[in-house]
């Protein structure tokens, strides 16, 4: 025979519909947003991790000035790798209008890097359509086509030839559309890749780029082993008549590695948000559990006095919270996995050229987002019930289950007006509830400001990056290039380059006198010298103001288990004209202020820096700090830099210059300018903007739900007093002024008073969120964002107050007539 208590469950649900609906919304919305993002991000992370095997992605690539001789490729393959040609042609692509575009006469243009269809390495995956089958067909990158409304069946002109788009594809070696792997930003607007048949490839009138991809026979090489292999490949190529102009492993290729790094870093932000949400849920569950038991105390006392066992009451009062929690978890997961995963997925798929999306079940995400909140709800209610059930039936009947219920009221001055005394009485009688409301508002405000401050933090980081730019141009070179040269030295270097980069067949066909002249000019170049002469002329003024420096990429450990931080180690001139604020002295290193703050470094202490390519470790004493809070560099005098790394005296691999320098592109890795920095900032803002927008939406929803639940608790506890006021003849509007205004004053005061607490806690939260990113993101909360947070809080409360006005209007007079011993 079923317990009669079961009949009370529907009535409890109807009577406390607002409370349980709020709990349902809090759990369901939190699970939907966080699980939607994390399952999408973890699925993308798995797709990226599986790409090397699923699409036979390269372990690295090298580009030669001309087609490498067979013996050079054979020598490379003897090192334990497989090599495949991935030759490309770069040409202008134009198209008229686009599929579904009304402006049919508009002409779009971009640069396309065209490849032959691949069947061994770096296999294409198709989102739409199919691989090209005829010489007049081409497949283009998915993200580029999405940006320009190009679709299967559209026609494009490539190098003067017409091609029909047969498929929309992605290539694993171009998951981010970096035109050059050493670029700082990718470009999916004016650059794309394409795949066509061998015949279609040959029909395009554009120069060939001789790029080769390789895969190591032994999988899972670490960075040091991959670097050693790359060095051996370069040696094998040069010794066998090939002239490599570019070599890099997959980890150094931004077109391959950038997307994976971005997805991994963003998950930490949502996991921190999840921790905040769980803390808020625990707080709300504790408050509501206490309120529920207090409201039901007389009934619990009656049931205990009637002979019901405590375990029966525990089962009864646990049924609704557990049921609501499970239903909310089911609803949240359904929405997250079926609806919200799509916009979360699109945050990445709109930027990165990844294979077709496939969702994978993730037990870790399920446990964090579903099991923890539901178990927390059940445990909090269970603990609250077990503690309260220590009271006797008589204490329950007298509503003396808390110390507060046994205290006498505080005498108020009689000279105060009745309205003021009544509001003070409401405040004092509900002081624990109002303190709870303050804590809840502080939690909700922290969540909201956390979302609102992300973009200002990123913008401030960008401003710091620009302020740390010491020159209008910072050229990073592959080898030392001397720009202070005369005409004869330029001619000699140009001759040597031409001889080394011209295919043997073309050299044999060259006029004998021209060949002799080239050889005579090239003989003036010292083959054993590490320094090459620049083949391009610069003005004396430009040469005079340029300053040589050296730079190396190192790593240092971040605090906690957050991996390694990239550090650029600079070797600078004594009394540098560009690094004037860096006092680099012998025997110590100067570190950027951002590096010191993030990694907990201090002057007089030591910093341990490691080279991931050689596994060497360097321990240096810190002599000072410099730069902004985003400066993650380290500085040594260039002479000491060269001694530390075993370089030749006078070695350098960069120029700082306020004037543009003409340097042979063959030797330039990158040219960092303020414009480049603006592009980096724009890309970072674009990447973070959509994610932080989602955070703000989630925070606003939680804000409303949390404020409704906490303020409703105050009104529910005052239901009898409200009923008395109605019996005494007070109109609903007057009752609202007494109760709602008291709550309003508390809410507004809480919104203002919790701001210092929020700012204090937010610094640690933001540091935690960005700990997994390279760079130090200083916490900056503009006053405008705090004002916005207060305004959002007031608007949310206004919506909640409207619901409470209706609730007060519906409080029955019968409550005042019920006996209370």
Image (cartoon, helix red, strand yellow):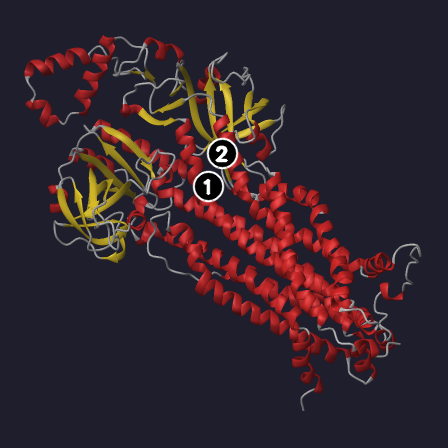
Q: Closer to the N terminus: mark 1 or mark 2? A: 2
- Residue lying at 59% horizontally and 65% vertically, measured from the top left: 25
Dot 2: few (<14), some (14–19), or many (≥20) neighbours within 10 Å? many
**Residue 361 left/right relative to 740:** left
Q: Which mark is residue 816?
A: none
Residue with the most extreme bottom position: 1
Q: Is residue 539 above or below residue 77?
A: above
Mark drawn on residue 685: 1
Q: Is residue 314 left or right of residue 421?
A: left
Q: Is residue 782 visible in this depiction of the protein? A: yes
Q: The N terminus is located in which quarter?
A: bottom right
Disc 2 is placed on an element classified as helix
Q: Quadrant of residue 699?
A: bottom right
Residue nearest the viewer, comparing 42 with 237: 42
Identify whether 436 is placed above or below 530: below
Task: Mark yes or no: residue 85 visible.
Answer: no
Question: Residue 609, relative to residue 275: is it above or below?
Answer: above
Q: Is residue 52 left or right of residue 108?
A: right
Kindly state the secondary structure of the residue where label 1 is placed.
helix
Which corner quadrant of the image does residue 248 belong to?
top left
Badges 1 and 2: C-beta atoms under 8 Å apart?
yes
Horizontal and vertical percent for residue 38?
A: 49, 56
- Residue found at x 54% / y 39%: 456
Q: Which residue is mark 2?
A: 462
Q: CA distance from mark 1 to mark 2?
A: 9 Å
Where residue 133 sits, quadrant-wise, is bottom left
User: Percent position (x, y) of residue 629?
Assistant: 56, 30
Q: Is residue 579 left or right of residue 179?
A: right
- Which of 553 and 355 lies nearest the eye of the viewer? 355
What residue do we see at 10% from left, 25% from top?
506
């Amino acid at each position: 025979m079923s317990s009669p208590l079961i009949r009370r469950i529907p009535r409890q649900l109807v009577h406390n519909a607002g409370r349980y609906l709020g709990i349902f919304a809090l759990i369901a919305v939190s699970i939907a947003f966080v699980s939607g993002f994390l399952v999408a991000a973890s699925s993308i992370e798995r797709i990226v991790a599986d790409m090397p095997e699923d699409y036979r992605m390269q372990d690295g690539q090298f580009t030669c000035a001309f087609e490498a001789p067979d013996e050079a490729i054979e020598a490379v393959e003897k090192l334990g790798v497989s090599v495949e040609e991935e030759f490309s042609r770069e040409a202008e692509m134009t198209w008229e209008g686009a599929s579904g575009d009304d402006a049919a006469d508009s002409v779009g243009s971009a640069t396309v890097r065209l490849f032959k269809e691949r069947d061994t390495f770096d296999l294409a995956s198709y989102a739409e359509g199919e691989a090209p089958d005829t010489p007049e067909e081409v497949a283009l990158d998915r993200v580029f086509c999405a940006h320009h409304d190009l679709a299967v069946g559209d026609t494009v002109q490539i190098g003067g030839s017409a091609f029909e788009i047969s498929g929309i594809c992605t290539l694993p070696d171009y998951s981010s559309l970096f035109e050059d792997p050493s670029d700082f930003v990718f470009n999916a607007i004016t650059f794309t890749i394409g795949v066509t048949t061998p015949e279609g490839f040959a029909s395009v009138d554009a120069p060939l780029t001789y790029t080769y991809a390789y895969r190591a026979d032994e999988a899972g090489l670490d960075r040091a082993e991959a670097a050693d292999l790359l060095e051996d490949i370069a040696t094998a190529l040069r010794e066998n008549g090939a002239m490599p102009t570019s070599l890099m492993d997959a980890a150094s290729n931004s077109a391959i590695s950038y997307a994976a790094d971005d997805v991994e870093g963003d998950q930490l932000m949502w996991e921190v948000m999840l921790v905040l949400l769980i803390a808020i849920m625990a707080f709300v569950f504790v408050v509501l559990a206490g309120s529920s038991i207090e409201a039901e105390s007389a009934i619990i006392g009656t049931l205990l006095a009637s002979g019901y066992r405590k375990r029966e009451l525990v089962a009864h009062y646990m049924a609704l919270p557990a049921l609501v929690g499970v239903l909310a978890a089911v609803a949240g997961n359904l929405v997250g996995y079926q609806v919200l995963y799509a916009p979360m997925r699109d945050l990445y798929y709109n930027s990165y050229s990844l294979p077709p999306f496939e969702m994978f079940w993730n037990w870790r995400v399920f446990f964090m987002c579903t099991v923890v909140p539901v178990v927390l709800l059940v445990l909090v209610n269970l603990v609250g019930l077990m503690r309260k059930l220590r009271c006797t039936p008589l204490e329950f009947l007298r509503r003396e289950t808390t110390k507060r219920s046994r205290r006498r009221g505080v005498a108020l001055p009689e000279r105060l007006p009745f309205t003021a005394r009544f509001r003070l009485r409401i405040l004092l009688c509900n002081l624990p509830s109002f303190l709870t409301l303050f804590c809840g508002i502080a939690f909700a405000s922290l969540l909201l400001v956390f979302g609102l401050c992300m973009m200002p933090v990123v913008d401030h980081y960008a401003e710091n990056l620009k302020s740390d730019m010491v020159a209008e141009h910072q050229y990073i070179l592959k080898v030392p290039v001397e720009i202070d040269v005369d005409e004869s030295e330029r001619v000699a270097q140009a001759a040597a380059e031409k001889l080394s980069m011209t295919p043997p067949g073309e050299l044999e066909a060259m006029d004998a006198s021209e060949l002799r002249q080239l050889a005579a000019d090239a003989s003036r170049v010292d083959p054993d010298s590490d320094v090459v002469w620049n083949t391009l002329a610069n003005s004396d003024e430009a040469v005079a103001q340029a300053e040589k420096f050296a730079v190396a990429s190192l790593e240092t450990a971040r605090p906690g288990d957050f991996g390694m931080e990239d550090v650029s180690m600079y070797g600078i001139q004594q009394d540098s004209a560009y690094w004037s604020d860096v006092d680099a002295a012998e025997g110590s290193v100067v570190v950027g202020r951002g590096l010191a703050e993030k990694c907990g470094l201090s002057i007089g202490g030591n910093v341990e820096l490691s080279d991931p390519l050689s596994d060497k470790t360097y321990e240096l004493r810190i002599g000072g700090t410099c730069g902004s809070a985003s400066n993650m560099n380290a500085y040594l005098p260039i002479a000491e830099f060269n001694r530390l790394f075993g370089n030749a005296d006078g070695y350098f691999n960069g120029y700082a210059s306020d004037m543009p320098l003409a340097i042979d592109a063959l030797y330039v890795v990158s040219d960092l300018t303020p414009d480049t920095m603006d592009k980096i900032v724009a890309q970072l803002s674009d990447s973070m903007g959509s994610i932080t927008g989602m955070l703000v939406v989630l925070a606003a929803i939680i804000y409303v739900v949390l404020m409704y639940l906490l303020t409703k608790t105050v009104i529910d506890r005052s239901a009898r007093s409200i009923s008395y006021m109605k019996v005494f003849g007070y109109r609903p509007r007057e009752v609202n002024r007494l109760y709602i205004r008291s709550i309003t004053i508390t809410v507004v005061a809480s919104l203002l008073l919790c701001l210092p607490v929020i700012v204090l806690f937010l610094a640690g939260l933001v540091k935690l969120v960005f700990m997994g990113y390279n760079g130090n993101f200083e916490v900056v909360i503009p006053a405008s964002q705090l004002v916005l947070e207060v305004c959002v809080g007031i608007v949310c409360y206004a919506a909640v107050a409207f619901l409470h006005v209706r609730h007060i209007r519906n409080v029955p007079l019968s409550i005042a007539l019920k006996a209370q011993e």
